[in-house]
Image (tube, helix red, strand yellow):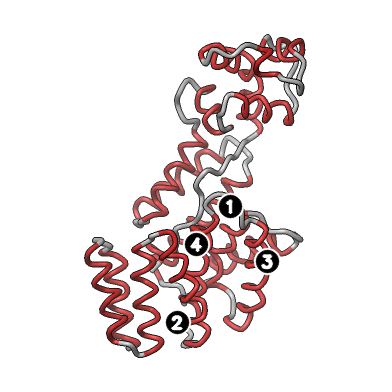
Amino acid sequence: MVQYFERLFTKHKQYSTFLEVRMFTWNFGSVYKTIRRSKGLTQKMVCGGFLSTTTLSKIENHHVVPSVEHMIFLLDQINMSVEEFHYICNFYQPSERQKIFSQYRKVAQKPKIDEIQRLIVSCDNYLSKQHDVPVEHLRSILKIVLFMRQHGPNKKDRDFGHLTEKIYHYLDKQDTWYMSDLRLLQTILYAFPVENLPQLTKRIFESLEKYKDFQNIKEAQINILTNISTIYFYNQLKNECEEVTLKILDLAKELKRYDSLGFAQVRLGICRGDEALIENGLALLRLTDEQDLLTMLEEEVKKYR
């Protein structure tokens, strides 16, 4: 189950450790000048009326460290993300930290136990040299996913409880949940009593609403709705499950996400006792070669039909 439901929305996240920020700002000016010139842009063209050419010259020659505001402005003028610029600063190679998050994006699609274990080791090695809160959170996520892959979402033990409690205490004190926080929360939803889910869901949706115009938000919505649907489903709360799954169905159609569309059809078919809907969903997953998801849902059909 986790091999599908742990598609955590990590795309386009930009993280920085102290060491990386220090290196990044040190290289910023000279690398920026090289890119600007290669694009045929003059200092005057870049600065417009926002920044003086004198200030840009000082930045490019390492006489001034740019403020965050100036850094973002300058990167916008060359149409480049912080992540890409950082990659270039590291001689067109990902940093150790970027490698960890890049590998996580791959693992999160179809996580295998040995891959998760190797990535946990990479996090441990990195954290032995650097203090990095997001990587610490990622390690916790990976340990939770590993436990659930090995034992299922309903089995609990002391270490599992400690991990989920640690993450929730971090999140609960916040008055706003950002995308990285929602990714963390999505991982531990299975640890909460089902009676707490409606209130938790309400707060999640309030946070997602703030991001309604943000890139890729609908993919994030599908992921977290899928987890919520599954929790309701395995607790035999079919009305609540159907309500959430209908939202997945609409989003899947809009995004042409055929894996999620097949999933929603099968899940709705089970909730409604609709054999035709179940078969349509399974057929779609066979056509799209979503074998892992297909196997999981076929088992659901056998058990809960």
Q: Nearer the viewer, mark 3 or mark 1?
A: 3
Mark 4 belongs to which amino acid? Ile
Q: How far apart are marks 3 and 2 (CA)?
A: 25 Å
Residue beneath the point at 52% across and 16% down: 39
According to the image, label 2 marks what residue?
A: 234
Mark 1 belongs to which amino acid? His
Q: How far apart are marks 1 and 2 (CA)?
A: 27 Å
Label at residue 144? 4
In the displayed structure, 255 sits above or below 240; it is above
User: Is tag 3's residue or tag 4's residue first in the polypeptide sequence?
Assistant: 4
According to the image, label 1 marks what residue?
A: 137
User: Is tag 3's residue or tag 1's residue first in the polypeptide sequence?
Assistant: 1
User: Is tag 1's residue or tag 2's residue first in the polypeptide sequence?
Assistant: 1
Q: Could you say whether the residue bearing mark 1 is in a helix, strand or loop? A: helix
Label at residue 206? 3
Mark 3 belongs to which amino acid? Glu
Number of callouts in the render? 4
Q: Quick one: quadrant of the C terminus?
A: bottom left
Residue 128, position in %: x, y? 56, 39
